[in-house]
Image: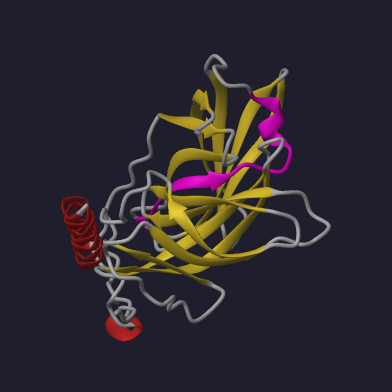
């Protein structure tokens, strides 16, 4: 009997030691530090993403996706489900891992909202501040937005415009990857319009307005309803980009284009 008691006590001690070790090496909990509704907070050492999204009570259940917006397009960081009438303040990273792909800094971000049943895009919450911290234990003020650097745009003496622009449409985000260029030899903005051949008609599918000189626009939103005219795996479709001087409306050039690929990202 005494031996059984000693074994039981020893087992309890081992269990207690294991619990203490687990608590010691586990990432300590942290307090949420988002200060505004228009912010997204991410961490190198946590799979928790802080944000704010309120789904109205009369709306269907939705899936939200938090994205970091960089020069060549948005990158998904996390996603979560929001029921009717629910307010969500955290989601998990998409892959369940920590957000360590980008250096700590203040970036631009957005939230895409999809109908959970149909998968259709319902809303884009734009212009959010995305704060990427090295650690969830860092103070809120350890990150400060950088002052924009004033750079003089050095224009070229000659203008180069491509003969063909190949583009890709993503039906999930209802966006087109296009790579439209501003002027390189003139200090003037351009309004550029993308037209595609749909059932033998020229249809406006996307537009980029007031493109600055020496700029490249990689991503544009499709016009409302246009996504329904395309299907995943469509063969290449002819298109063209008409660009006008933004200040006078005068046609600058028309460049041949091609919708080379239609995809739906998961």
Residue at 74% across, 38% down? 225
Q: Position of residue 34 (x, y in %)?
A: 46, 77
Q: Horizontally, is 110 left or right of 24 in the view?
A: right
Q: Nearer the viewer, residue 46 or 76?
A: 46
**Furthest residue toward top:** 235
In the rendered image, the vertical position of residue 234 relative to residue 14, given as above or below? above
Q: Is residue 220 magenta?
A: yes
Residue 28 at x, y = what percent? 29, 70
The residue located at (64%, 25%) in the rendering is 230
> In the rendered view, does 139 fall on the left or right side of 82?
left
Res. 188 visible in picture: no
Above or below: residue 142 compared with residue 160? below
Residue 86 locus on image (x, y percent):
69, 62
Judging depth in this view, the residue of 79 and 157 nearest the camera is 79
Picture mark count: 0
Q: Which residues are magenta?
A: 214-230
Residue visible at 31% across and 56% down? 99
Q: Residue 233, image x and y in percent?
A: 54, 17
Look at the image and name its color scheme: secondary structure
Residue 218: name its quadrant: top left
Q: Is residue 87 above or below residue 157?
A: below
């Amino acid at each position: 009997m005494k031996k059984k008691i000693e074994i039981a006590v020893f087992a309890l001690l081992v269990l207690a030691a294991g619990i203490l070790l687990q608590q010691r090496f586990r990432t300590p909990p942290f307090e949420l530090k988002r200060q505004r509704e228009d912010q997204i907070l991410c961490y190198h050492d946590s799979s928790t993403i802080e944000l704010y999204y309120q789904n109205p009570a009369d709306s269907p259940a939705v899936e939200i996706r938090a994205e970091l917006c960089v020069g060549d397009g948005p990158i998904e960081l996390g996603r979560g489900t929001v029921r009717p009438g629910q307010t969500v303040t955290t989601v998990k990273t998409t892959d369940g891992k920590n957000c360590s792909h980008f250096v700590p800094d203040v970036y631009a971000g957005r939230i895409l909202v999809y109908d959970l049943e149909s998968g259709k895009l319902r809303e884009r919450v734009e212009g959010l501040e995305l704060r990427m911290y090295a650690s969830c234990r860092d103070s809120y003020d350890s990150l400060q937005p950088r002052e924009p650097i004033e750079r003089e745009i050095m224009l070229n003496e000659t203008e180069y415009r491509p003969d063909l622009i190949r583009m890709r449409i993503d039906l999930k985000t209802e966006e087109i990857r296009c790579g439209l260029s501003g002027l390189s030899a003139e200090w003037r903005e351009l309004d550029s319009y993308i037209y595609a051949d749909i059932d033998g008609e020229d249809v406006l599918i996307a537009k980029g307005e007031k493109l600055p000189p020496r700029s490249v626009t990689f991503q544009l939103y499709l016009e409302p309803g246009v996504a329904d005219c395309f299907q995943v795996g469509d063969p290449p479709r002819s298109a063209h980009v008409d660009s006008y001087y933004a200040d006078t409306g005068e046609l600058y050039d028309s460049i041949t284009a091609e919708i080379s690929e239609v995809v739906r990202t998961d």
